[in-house]
Image (cartoon, rainbow, N blue to C red):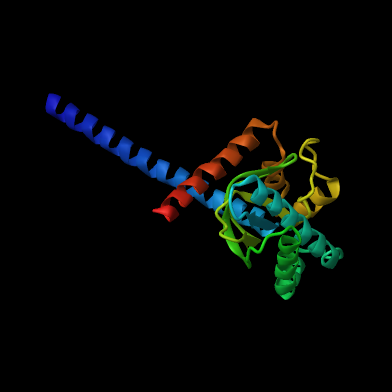
Amino acid sequence: MKKILNFINFSFIKRFFVVLILFSAFIFISALSYVNAVSEDISDSVFRLHVIANSDSDEDQALKYKVRDAILDYMDDITANCTSKEEVISLANEHKEEMCNVAKETISANGYDYDVSIEIGNFEFPTKQYGDISLPAGYYDAVRVKIGEASGQNWWCVMFPPLCFVDVTSGVVPNESKEIIKENLNNDEEYSIISDKEDAGIQFKFSLIEFFKNINFAKASN
């Protein structure tokens, strides 16, 4: 009788752990699917700018911001009437050479002779906050500007919707820019994930996205 009871207990424990493993796998796969869907929607809603300085010297860092401002001024003029990310990307591709010339002229006007390279593609970005909007780590479409050796600190912003000149000291993104992001996302929850800093449940979902994206980045770097 004792052997029978031991066998029943062992079978129960075995089934319990099998169910637990299957349930954990289901939760993991569901969370991963959710993260991938939300991350893709968020990244699809913005077009970013990434400027890399020649070095970390004070002079090169100051030059980086001047190049940034010159490119943004140029792009603001030609994308003023754009209402979608696709339009901005199309114009950026059409005017890639002009953007490069604007950067080179700015560098030359400030007494340097660094070369400039500009790429338009899909690049890895860390978590960044723009006023009261936070974009999780992930891969985003962007213009990448490399100055000289491109071994200095990076500078990131969002070219569409226009968040590059957000006054971070005020901590508030203009409502017009928020509306553009919201319109390009699939639902209100996705917008809440990047904008709501108070709701604990929403913040947990943001942290979940960060967790899985950090795992993906770690795998990609190995």
Q: Is residue 114 visible?
A: yes
Q: Quadrant where the N terminus lies?
A: top left
Residue 123 percent across, percent down from the top left? 58, 59
**Looking at the picture, does residue 104 appear above or below residue 94?**
above
> Along the horizontal axis of the image, is 35 left or right of 26?
right
> Along the horizontal axis of the image, is 90 left or right of 141?
right
> Along the horizontal axis of the image, is 138 left or right of 8?
right
The total of numbered circles placed on residues is 0
Residue 149 percent across, percent down from the top left? 56, 59
Q: Is residue 1 visible?
A: no
Residue 86 percent across, percent down from the top left? 73, 67
Q: Nearer the viewer, residue 109 or 118?
A: 109
Residue at point 50% right, 49% down? 32
> Along the horizontal axis of the image, is 208 left or right of 48?
left
Residue at point 63% right, 63% down? 114
* Quarter of the view holding residue 202: top right
Q: Nearer the viewer, residue 1 or 126?
A: 126
The residue lying furthest to the front in this view is: 111
